[in-house]
Image: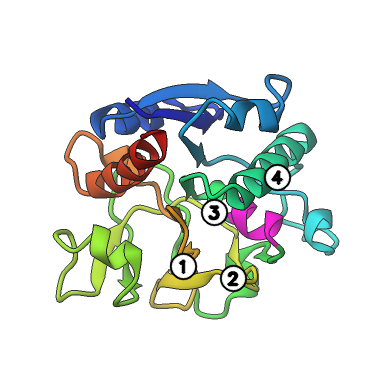
Amino acid sequence: MALIAIAQNRRMSDYLESVRRAGGEPIEVAAGGELPQHLLARVDGIMLTGGGDIDPMLYGEPPHAECQAAEADRDAFETALTRAAIAANIPYFAICRGMQLLNVAMGGTLIQDIPSQVPGALEHSVPEPRAHVVHEVWIAKDSRLSALLADHMEDGETCHVNSRHHQSVARVAPGFDVTATSPDGVIEAMEKPGAAFCIGVQWHPENFWRTGEFRSLFEGFVQAANARKR
């Protein structure tokens, strides 16, 4: 069974259950524990989770007035873990803040506050209920994300998602493709072509473990981790 390291946040239960139901064995990891290089030597996959804002200084910008205080230790740990995992081609799945961290760690930037910086933006921050569908996303054909969500999409390119974020990817990190957007142009997913598995999504698929709409994302991730384990 693939061992999946999940970056710790304040609400872990849905992430843990999603990985278990996909056939993986989850463990929680955080700053102050194992060094990234030691951790990567014993796990088969890495998952980054949701949480607060990333320090804008990490991508060379002053903080916007709506930017929340950063968790410096978490930023540093997850940045080091991400860079090492991508360099080693370890299966990697990033969710919400996780996708933003992935983008920043690999050289991209963020929109710091969607409501004030994206004209005509949709509502992207609906905290409850956690599995409430908020808007649609348009998924790029021929992407790995599209293949994984084939049974969940309408008309081959659209699916509906929950949403609770006020930041998003701005300039995409080199070597990554945008694979989903919302109708207002906000980037909703990215992936690294040719990687064993490297996908980030802006919504929260883990909140749907009871109903299974996005189980295929976790299954694809765990399958890639199992292939590495073998």
Disc 4 vs disc 3: which is toward the camera? 4
The residue that mark 4 highlights is 79
Give the residue type that dot 2 points to. Answer: Gly
Q: Residue at x 72, y 46 (%)?
A: 68
Q: CA distance from mark 3 to mark 1?
A: 15 Å
Q: Which dot marks residue 175?
A: 2
Query: Quick one: SS at disc 2?
Result: loop
Residue 196: x and y in percent read 43, 53
Q: Note whether 13 is above or below 78 in the view shown.
A: above
The residue that mark 1 highlights is 193
Q: CA distance from mark 2 to mark 4?
A: 17 Å
| Quarter placement of the C terminus | top left
The residue that mark 3 highlights is 99
Q: Which residues are magenta?
A: 100-106
First in residue order: circle 4 vs circle 3: 4
Tell me if 118 is positioned left or right of 164 in this view: right
Disc 1 vs disc 4: which is toward the camera? 1
First in residue order: circle 2 vs circle 1: 2
Tell me if 117 is positioned left or right of 227 in this view: right
First in residue order: circle 3 vs circle 2: 3
Residue 185 magenta-highlighted: no
Question: Do callouts 2 and 1 mark residues in contact (Cβ within 8 Å)?
Answer: yes
Give the residue type that dot 3 points to. Answer: Met
Give the residue type that dot 4 points to. Answer: Thr
Give the residue type that dot 1 points to. Answer: Pro
Tell me if 33 is positioned left or right of 189 in this view: right
